[in-house]
Image: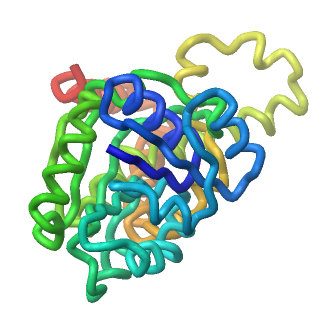
């Protein structure tokens, strides 16, 4: 299988690393807007050949688009314009409604499979690529009924090589769900980091007191703005809805504390503890 990857960051690089290691890809072609990223990917063997975008599109049996969603929405129609009827295009962006709507009427829409591997780290760039990052994680395929059966089958097989568990969603329902389980957690982490950094200006020892709980909660604040701002913008309505609910919960806790309502706080925390039954 010949694989082309457009966007050689953490996701694209990690994808290349394990698909080669596990025997899925015989040749890997790569394009990145950054010559540094592209050159590094070739130097360390993530890809076999550095390409222009057009070369990458023409050479791959599968063309994976692994760029920020704002860029993917712009380039996907052009990628579909340039493939033949046997090639498959897969994107791995974190939002799906707008990108699927963008190509809904395209003549080669059925050669495109909208995918979201729910995996990643707070790091970015091909130098952050790691083996095993996708193992055991969820792979969401959206609007599969709009894709050819063989294209969906091939996409599933590719991600099964990465030991991912496949789920199927409507693209707009997907965006609602990920606003809760992914996008909100990033917003909260960014806000927590801002809060502590503001405090640290006056209390220089605050980070010496930080323990594992703080580190794990604020880890996502290290995530790349170039990736996450387009996600928030593209999923704006859902993120705003979720943020409204979250702010309401914060205000509830604040009021319990203001009122010295010990029982209320106990109930609040015990109710939150129900998450243990979901996240085992």
Q: Is residue 256 visible?
A: no
**In the displayed structure, does residue 119 sit left or right of residue 105?**
right
Q: Is residue 272 visible?
A: yes
The residue lying at 30 percent from left, 85 percent from top is: 106
Q: Position of residue 84 (x, y in %)?
A: 32, 73
Question: Image point 43% across, 67% down: which residue?
Answer: 235
Q: Residue visible at 53% across and 43% down? A: 188
- In the figure, residue 80 lies in which quadrant? bottom left
Residue 16: x %, y % from top left: 46, 36
Relative height, residue 184 to residue 55 (above, below): above
Is residue 200 depicted above or below 209 in this figure?
below
Determine the residue positioned at 21% across, 73% down: 110
Query: In the visual, does 105 lie left or right of 207?
Result: left
Color theme of the render:
rainbow
Say which of 176 and 241 sits in front: 176
Res 95 → quadrant:
bottom left
- Left or right: residue 185 versus residue 271 is right
**Which of 160/179 is in front?**
160
Quadrant the N terminus occupies: top left
Tally of numbered tags: 0
Rendering coords of residue 170 (x, y %): 18, 65
Tell me the quarter of the image containing the C terminus. top left
Q: Position of residue 122 (x, y in %)?
A: 58, 34
């Amino acid at each position: 299988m010949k694989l082309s990857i457009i966007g050689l960051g953490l996701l694209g690089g990690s994808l290349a690393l394990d698909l080669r290691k596990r025997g899925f890809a015989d040749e890997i072609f790569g394009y990145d807007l950054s010559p540094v990223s592209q050159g590094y990917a070739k130097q360390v063997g993530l890809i076999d050949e550095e390409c222009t975008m057009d070369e990458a599109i023409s050479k791959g049996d599968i063309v994976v688009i692994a760029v920020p969603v704002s860029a993917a929405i712009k380039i996907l129609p052009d990628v579909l314009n340039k493939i033949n009827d046997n090639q498959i295009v897969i994107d791995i962006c974190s939002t799906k409604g707008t990108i699927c709507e963008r190509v809904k009427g395209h003549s080669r829409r059925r050669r495109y499979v909208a995918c979201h591997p729910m995996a990643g780290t707070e790091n970015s760039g091909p130098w952050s690529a790691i083996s095993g990052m996708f193992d055991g994680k969820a792979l969401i395929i959206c609007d599969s009924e709009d894709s050819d059966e063989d294209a969906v089958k091939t996409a599933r097989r590719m991600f099964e090589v990465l030991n991912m568990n496949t789920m199927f969603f409507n693209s707009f329902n997907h965006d609602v769900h990920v606003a809760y389980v992914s996008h909100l957690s990033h917003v909260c982490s960014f806000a927590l980091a801002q809060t502590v950094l503001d405090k640290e200006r006056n209390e220089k020892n605050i980070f010496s007191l930080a323990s594992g709980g703080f580190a794990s909660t604020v880890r996502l604040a290290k995530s790349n703005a170039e990736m996450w701002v387009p996600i928030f913008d593209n999923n704006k309505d859902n993120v705003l809805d979720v943020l409204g609910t979250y702010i309401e919960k914060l205000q509830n806790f604040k009021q319990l504390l203001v009122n010295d309502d010990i029982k209320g706080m106990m109930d609040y925390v015990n109710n939150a503890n129900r998450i243990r039954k979901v996240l085992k």
